[in-house]
Structures are given as C-alpha cells and as structure tokens.
Amino acid sequence: MASEGDEAPLVGRAATLAELRSDLSDVGPAGTAAVFVTGESGVGKSRLLQETADAMRAAGAAVLSGACLDIGDASPLHPVLQALRRSGSAPDAAPTGGPPDDAGALLEWVSQRLRAVAGDRPLLLVLDDLQWADRSTRQLLLYLLAGLGEVRLSVLAAVRAESLQGAHPLRRVLAELRRLRSVRVLDLAPLDHDGTRELVRAIAGEQVAAEDAEQVYKRSGGNPFVAEELARDLRDGRAELSDTLREIFLARVDELPKHAHSVVHAIAAGVEPVDHQVLARVVQLGDDELLEAVRAAVAHRFVLGEADGYRLRHRLVAEVLAQEVLPAERAALHRRYAEALEADPGTADHAALAHHWQQAGEPLRALPAVVAAARDAERLYGFSEAHRYWSVALELAGEGTPEIGRTELLSHAAESAYQCGEHALALTRLEELAGRADAPGACTLHLRRARYLAAAGRTATAETEYEQALALADCTPREKASAAAHLAELLLHLGRYADANARAREALELAELDGATADLVRASAALGFSSAFREDPDAGLAVIRHAVEIAERSGHPDDIGCAYLHLAELLTGPLNNLEEGVLVARRGAEKLAALGVGRTYQTRLLAIAANGLFRVGQWGEADRVLQDAMRHRPSGADAVELLLARCRLWVGFGDEEAADRDLDAIATMLAGGGARHVLPMLTLRAGLAMWRGRHAEARAAVQRGLTETRSDDLVLLGVLAWHGLRAEAEAHAAGDVPVDQGVVRRLKVVVDRMGQGAGGAAAPVRAVIDGYVELCAAELSRLEDRPDPEPWARAAATWDRRKQPYPAAYARLRQAEAALARKSRRAVAVTALRQAWETAQAMGARPFAAEISALAARARVPLTSDAAVEVGPAAPADELFVLTEREREVLAAVAEGLTNKEIGHRLFISERTVGVHVGHIFDKLQVRTRVQASRVYLRAA
C-alpha cells in the first residue's frame, strides 16, 4: 500500500513468508490447503499475498489472482472469474457460451477451468479483500477446499479483521473451514520496533535519528502503511500529517456507532492506559451502553482492551481527532478526566492528573500534581522525567503558591537538570537561586556550583569552588566531607594522583565522623584509583571493589555510577586489564541504564568500554558501542568522553573530516578541562596532523600539551611524548619541516622523567610506561638516522605482552623499515611487515595500512604469504617499479625542483597534464609532498 511509484521494501515478514509457502504446500487428504490472512487495514496483507504469489510462481506454480468488490450487487464469483480472465482462460469456453446458471453446474464448471489452468502444476488461488466476497464465492471455497472439485489447489486470501463484525457471513465460512487440517487462519500482527525502524530507514535514509524512528513506531503502532506514510513525511521534511492519512482515519472513525465514536474520542484524550471506571465517569454512559461501545471500538480495530486499561492501536488517531474538536470541547473532556482521577485519590496517577488539569486550562490546580509527579519520578530515579516536571512546575508557579515557593522549585529544577545531563541549564538555575533572598547558604551553593561546573567540563573553576567551600568556617562536617570527596575525584580527573590521594584520605576521615554513603563511595573510589596507579594495584583495586559493593547496597545511581566508572577506567587504562575492564564497563552501563541515567554515567561507561575495545584491536565492536552510546545525546564532560573515544576511531579509520569535527566540538566544550581530556585531545590532534603530513601542526599540538598540563599521569604523558618524537621523525623523513632540536631536547626530558617515575609506579602501570619509553627510544634512533630494527623489535614484543595490537603493529612497520634500510635480514623485515599488514587490515586502520603498503611496494615485498619472497636485497630502482615511463620522467623533473609549468615546457605537455601525473605519482609512492617524492627518487637513483 505504498504511494504510487514509491513502493517500500518488505521488512519484518521473512519468517511469515516462509511459513506461508510451507503451509500452502502442505496439502491435506483432499489435495487442498488454505491460509486466510487476517489483520487491520494497512498491516500489509495485500503485499504479503503479492510476495507469496511471486515466490510460488517463480517456483513453478500456476497462480491466479483476484479481488472482491465492496459493492452490494457484484456478479457471482467475481474474484474467481476475474482471476480466470487475467490468466487468459475466458469464461465463454463453457458449452452454453458462459457460466451455467445452476449452482451445482456452476461450481463444477469453475473446477474444470481451474484444472485446465493448473495442468500438471500446483495451483495457487489468491483472493484479496475476502470480507466482501459474494455468496457464490464463499460456497465455492467450501466446495473446493473440501476436495469436491477434484482440483489440487492452495488458496491464499486476505480478510480485513475489523470488517468481520456480528453475523458477518464469512465468519461462519471460516468456522467451517477451520475444521479442515490443511486450513489455517493467520492474524498478521503489526511490525515491532526493529521492523518499523528498518522500514523508516529504508524510506527516509540510514541517517534517520533513532528517536525519529521510535516516534514513527509510537504514532503508527507498527502499521506498515501508516509507518511508510510517516517515513515519507520525515524524508520530505513535512511536519504536518499528510492528507492521505488524515482522511483514511477520519473515514474509519465516521463508520463507528455513535457511542463507540465517543469512546474513541475520550480514550484519544486520555493518558493511556485508561481505566474502565475512569472512562465511565468521562463518557457518562450506562454500564451496558459503555460496554457495547467499547466492544464496537475494539472490533473496529481502534482500541485495545488489556488488563490495565484501554489503549488506542495507533496514537496517530489521537493526533487526527485532536484537530477535529473545538477548544472548549477539549478543555471540558480533560476537566472530566481530572475530576474522575481526583474522585479516587488513593490510586491517583499524578502525572496524568497534572496533564489533564493543564489541558483543561487550570494551571494552579495542575501545580500540586506536577510537583507530586516530579517527586514520584525522583523516587524511581527517573531524572529526565523529574527534570521535565520541575521545569513545568517553574512555568506554572510564577512566584509560587503557599504550598511551594519558587526558591524550592528552583533548587529542585537545578538539581534535576544536573542529574539528567543538562549542565548549562543547571548552572543557570543555580545562579537564579543564589540571587534570591531566601537562597541556601554559601557552602551549599559552592558545592553545587562546583559539581555542575565539573560535569560541564569546566574543571579549573570547579576546583576553585571546592577549595572555597572547604575554606568556609560555617561548612558542616558533612558538607566538608562531601567537598573533599568530590575534589578528590576531580583531581583524579586532572591526573594529579598524589593530590587526589591526599584529599581522598581527608574525605574518608570526615565521612567516618558525619558523612553520607555517597561521600564514602566517591572518596574510596578516588583513593583506590590513585593508590593502584602510584603504589599497590592489588590494594587499590580492593578499595575500589569495596566501593562498588557499598554503592550497590545503597542502590543510588550516583554511587553506582561513580564506583563502576573508576573501576572500569582503572582496569582499561593504567592497569591494562583490558578484557575485565570492558566487561565491568558494560555491566555497569546496563545497571545504570535500568536506573535511568543513560545520558550521564551509562554514556561514560560505554566510552570506557569503547576505549578498551580500541586498545585490544576490536575497532568494529568499539564503533558499535559508541553508536549505541550516541543515542543518549550527552552533554558536558560526558559528551567529551564519548567524542574522544569516537575520534580515536576516526583517526584510526582515516576519516579526517569526522575527526576534525569531533576535535573542534571537544575543544569548544572543554573550556579548562583536565589532563585526562586535554592530553588525549592534543594527542589525537597530533596523530591526525601526521597522517596529513602536517608535521608543524603535530609539533604544536604536542608542545601545547606539555605546556598546559600539571598532570603526574605518566601514561598520558608517554602517549603524548611518543607522538611528539614520531612527529619530529616524520618531519625529518619527509624533509619538509626542519627538525626543532629544542623540541627534541624537551621531549627527551619528558622521556627521562617517565623512566625515573616508572620505577616508583605500580608494576602494571610501569609496564605500560616502559612500552612508551621504548617507542620513544626507537623514534629517536629514526630521528638520528640510525636505522636499527632492534629497538623496534623490543617495542613490538612489549606491546604484544600488553595485548595492544596497534602500537605493536606500528613498531613492526618501523622494524621492517629499519631492516630494509640496512639492506640486511630481509626475511625478518618481510615477516614484520606482513604481521603489521594483517593487524592493520583486521582493525580497518586505512592510513596505517596504506603506509605499510607503500613501504612494501617500494621494497617489492608481497604482503600475502602465498607469493614468493625475495631474500636478497632489493635493487635501488625497484622503488619506482610502480611508475610508468612518463611518470618517471615527471618525477625526475620534480626532483630537480622544477614547477609544473617548467616540467610541461620540458616534456611538451600541458601544465594540467603534469598535475595529473604528479597526483598519480603521489598515490603510487604513497607520499604527500614533492619533497617526499623527490627523496624516494633520489634513493632509487
């Protein structure tokens, strides 16, 4: 039932199609089989009939198709005779010149025609809209399926379920036919969430947001026809409901009996599910009349009657009907709902009551219900819902009522905004709260402002706010414990582990005197992380695991999120226990999703899981995890964590545009972020710049990181220092940017600091730091023109032990490069190059794979093991074997320093043709600049 010329794909029906073909082939003793497909209008019955008919025709069956007419005076056997005419079997073949008048003779005559059409093939008779079948057609079905026509026949028919009301004659026929073993009635259900999402994306494009697809499902109820129309509106940018859908639904509503019409209107205005007693008070019908009206609404497929109340099959009906009533009618209907709910206060649904008083135009009567709904949501940890209700309460209250003042509303609204990830709004509301005469005390405001600032990624300002809170004389011991615990966590984020350790111990001492469970969990997590990094991983892990136990006993999302976050980050980061870390992160994310904090803690845990998967080389799975996390649309520090994780993938995959976009977004949001955000951002900037051959940009990013950080996280510094020395080595190899010896000396100081600091770090942390120290040492040998494969081999072995394939593969690439430069141990170089290639291919690291491929091409090393390997040194000219004769001439001129115009004059070709040749040369040699291309030529020459 797609729009003309725009048929949508069939989704979610593969199993049903297979089942239909099986049932239609499974004939009974009479040689017949039948499937009657029932379902509401638009559910896809006709499309299913068409697809099944096409499949069976392709399998060799004879197929006849006809449709019944919705007219009272249709000719007898209309759909069957129509099917015969379409097949070319004309009715005038009967001896009398047409179908006989006698009923028995008529049935036998049709049977003969069907046998003639079938011949030796199986025969499928497809009948659409069977609810309008004439009496003769119904009799024919009974006759044929009982085997009286001596036709080996399968029947596939579609029936609109809403039409089979009361004493409809087809109901009796279907009851008779159900007794036959080979007859089945299939009720075709609407599509589920996944099927609707697939259909929407097939029509509107893969870029459709998950929430838009979900909205289509809610409005359509999974009805494919309705979903298709809504998806086309989405694709074409139409906000209003299409006239097609509006007219279809209005026509169907107009067919309802009077009281059923009122029931559907009432349920459409209600908050589903609508309780029967509440509905009775709203529509004001007698018990028997109401039951009959509901029964009719259910029979016409508008309403679903379930144990907890009544629902519309399609919420779209509510949208259509809302535009058909006058404002005064709508207000009166909602007032009756509100009064009906208040009549039974023991079971009142505060959210529904608030909605109905608002729609009735009674804001002051709605306010108490809105506040009660917000408190209900908070008790269930529904922070997004609580935020919405507190925001509504602020709008309704003005300067408040005697029951609740604006100051209290602002306090709740600010905290709920923070809890659901609206950090900027939380800060705005807090500032309004601070400006009121009856605002909370200074210590409370400092604490809340610091929490909101930290969540927004403004860590430097947040640290100042915590320090101010701790310095205030009027802070209670509990407030001081909370400030110290939060500050310890913030210092951990800044990478200042010694300071974090000291503050965490202070917080635990205060918490023992008068602290909340949340402070105990936060301080324990910070102490455990810093201790595991600096001193004793086993003891630190034990402290964090104990914090997880305390958090799970408390059951509060903040406690659980904080504990799982630090445990997962410690395992996937400094301790390099990647597999357990990913499992912990995912388990924590599932727990927190169930508690309603998907936008904050769940998002960060999924980012940690993705980072762990990235390190173990499972980039495809990491991408899937991040796509799932992005559905929550996080903000502040949560968004930064997620964007950093995604940007690692973009840089690795070689999607430069996407990486640039995410890095710009991160830089905008950070505004003074800590080392655990700033250093990874700058490292990614440097890595992206190196793939582009912009070595000066890479150098600037690394130098900024070394200048701005006060972090004592030697792992983060190690990654940054490696990228800095790699950038200098790349610049030296390319020859386009002079090596800055001052920068190199500064990086050597950092490497020395890493080596000295590693001795005092915990063993697992020391092992990771040592891996970066080895990479830095190997980069220095490359920078100093000392091609030595041994440092690279040691680095590769170290990262193999750490189970991190990417740095191991990078080290193998450089090992092969150094071995080939020495023109010795070619077999070792070939093995290393192939191993690096396999890793790059498995991860999807396209730029890295291209660099490996370029080196292999220059050295004539086959990257697959089924090709013969040359064990002798490669001839110098082999590096240019991929170039044509003309490209070699152009490259020779480039190496002389000639411009494209000068080369064109020399070779008698146009300047544009020279540019094309230069582009091909760059691609084949895997270089990015004329200087790099010249170096390749001069080595070969």
Image: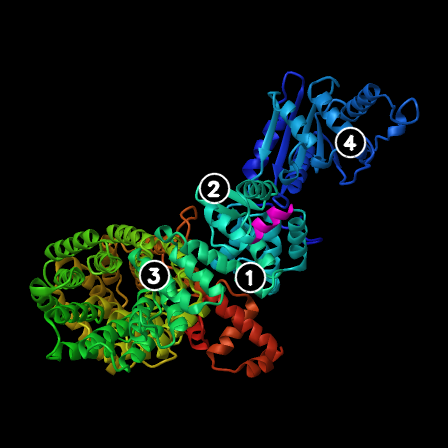
The circle on residue 80 is: 4
Residue 261 on the magenta span: yes
Magenta-drawn segment: 257-265
Amino acid on which the number 1 mark rests in the picture:
Arg
Q: Marks 3/2: CA distance?
A: 27 Å
Decide: is 706 above or below 391: below
> Which of these two is toward me, 904 or 503?
503
**Gap between marks 1 and 4 measured at Cα:** 49 Å
Rendered image quadrant of residue 734: bottom left
- Per the image, the residue denoted by label 3 is 372
* Gap between marks 2 and 1 measured at Cα: 25 Å
Total residue callouts: 4
Query: Marks 4 and 2, Cα distance to the nearest angstrom?
Result: 40 Å
Mark with earlier residue (3, 2) = 2
Callout 2 secondary element: strand
| Between 831 and 419, the one nearer to me in the picture | 419
Check disc 1 and report the residue beneath it.
330
Magenta part mainly helix, strand or loop? helix
Task: State yes or no: residue 920 in magenta.
Answer: no
- Label 1 to label 3: alpha-carbon separation: 24 Å
Where disc 1 sits, the SS reads helix
